[in-house]
Amino acid sequence: MKLVPVILCGGAGSRLWPLSRQLHPKPFIRLPDGTSFLQKAFLRATDLPGVSDVWTVTNRELYFKTVDEYHELGRDDVSTGFILEPVSRNTAAAIAAAALQISKQYGEETLVLILAADHLIDDQKEFGSAVSLASELALQGKLVTFGIQPDAPETGYGYLEVEGNNVVRFVEKPSLEKATEFVDSGRFLWNSGMFCFAAGAMLKEMSVHCPSILSATRQCIEKSRSWVEDGKGVRLELDKATFEDVPDASVDYAVMEKAAAISVVPCDIGWSDIGSWTALGEMSPADPDGNRLEGSVELHDTRNCTIHSNHRLVGAVGLENLIIIDSPDAVLVADKGAAQDVKRIYAKLESRGHEAHKFHRTMHRPWGTYTVLEEGTGFKIKRIEVKPGGRLSLQMHHHRSEHWIVVSGMAKVVNGEREFFVSTNESTYIPAGHKHRLENPGLIKLVMIEVQSGPYLEEDDIVRFQDSYGRA
């Protein structure tokens, strides 16, 4: 029986701000070993026996970043399908879209394994055994969830009350008193948010318990655009106008808490969702004073602190039980006991419309990256990196002119009616209103400095005429 893993890649990861942002959420954070949460999820899926196709449900704006993450792993033997959401509609809509698409492409009997992009699992062998047992139950028509044996009362997780492989009830995140009672009883497991089911079985249960979500998602897919990318898998870009009409609900609330045919696989697989800076810091070894450090840090008389800085030197003197996270455009300082409240800073930034909740100074694009080095009234300076073969859109700006200086590599430039090459230490000037395009025709990375000037310098001052990545 064919098993198709589906990775759900979204969310804000607000408790891991400032490294996690709306357009660089938790799955893309790099861990001490150099890989991201998302890459670990992909490798976890592809290492399962017989898996040849992996699907990902993610936001349209994260598509190219996700493709780059997968490409870095070199698993070109695996077909990668994508369902691209224009807006978030929670897990029920994402799973409905995945079940509909997989039923269409592979058949309703195909087994679907839902995985989160931002969890960690340490024991791949035990994970494989749990998936095998879940697959057997799913072949019997069950919707299967994975329950994690709790090792402490945890208020940040949902719980499952279980009897053997049967789920008695789902419980939302409890109080500490209730969580302690659950753990002491031995009848409860943490709800991991991973599921296994036959695509047709999930669609059948959705038609009974959340027909409006299923119907609206089906109508959306019928109006959506799909294509095959480089022969490696289908891309389904959900229609924004109709997807916005899909009700917003979690799959637990919409289906799992209501369906009768629910089973659980209790498992001990070294699972964690790394939901705070305290948890993420514990992935780094502690020094003799209990400090967990990453990056350039100098300490004096400092104990039990988590300090992260990959950009600047951070000095800490006379501190205890603090979290210090330094990023190029924001610094977090928090008491370890308040680690879960970091999301409140994120929420305040979001409510004010502050850009620090949404993106970093370095922005990923399908052709490469740009980093804002400095900006002020009437000017902005960027460092632009273009991958070999990368090509920006043919575009124009109404309000700004640009001066491009090549630092390394070779640039192929369209500037008005002219097309020419710009070498290292050479430059070109693009007046406002000129059509222009930048391309890297070489085999090495193109690095250049862009100096913008004009009365309005925001990213929405762009008119695209042609684009190799479907953005025009």
Image (cartoon, rainbow, N blue to C red):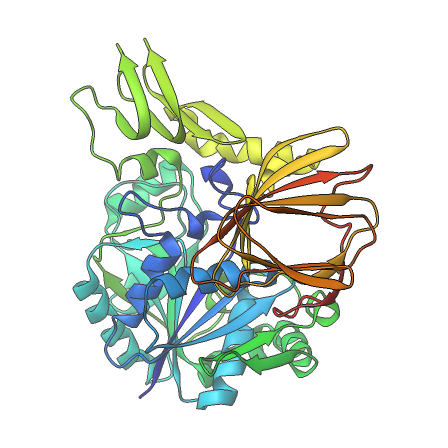
Rendered-image quadrant of the N terminus:
bottom left
Q: Residue at x 61, y 76 (%)?
A: 214
Side of 65 where 296 appears, left or right? left
Residue 450 occupies which quadrant of the picture?
top right
Front residue (pair 177, 298): 298
Rendered-image quadrant of the C terminus:
bottom right
Side of 266 where 221 appears, left or right? right
Residue 84 occupies which quadrant of the picture?
bottom right
Side of 128 where 438 appears, left or right? right
The relative height of residue 83 versus residue 328 in the rendered view (above or below) is below
Q: Residue at x 45, y 39 (%)?
A: 16
The relative height of residue 339 versus residue 30 in the rendered view (above or below) is above
Front residue (pair 410, 76): 410
Q: Residue at x 68, y 80 (%)?
A: 219
The relative height of residue 107 versus residue 86 in the rendered view (above or below) is below
Work out whether residue 247 can be spotted.
Answer: yes
Front residue (pair 273, 138): 273
Q: Residue 278 at what x, y percent from top left?
A: 34, 33
Q: Residue 50 at what x, y percent from top left?
A: 26, 81
The relative height of residue 76 versus residue 371 in the rendered view (above or below) is below
Work out whether residue 203 can be spotted.
Answer: no
Question: How many numbered marks appear?
Answer: 0
Residue 145 occupies which quadrant of the picture?
bottom left
Front residue (pair 465, 198): 465
Q: Residue 15 at what x, y percent from top left?
A: 47, 38
Q: Residue 290 at what x, y percent from top left?
A: 22, 23
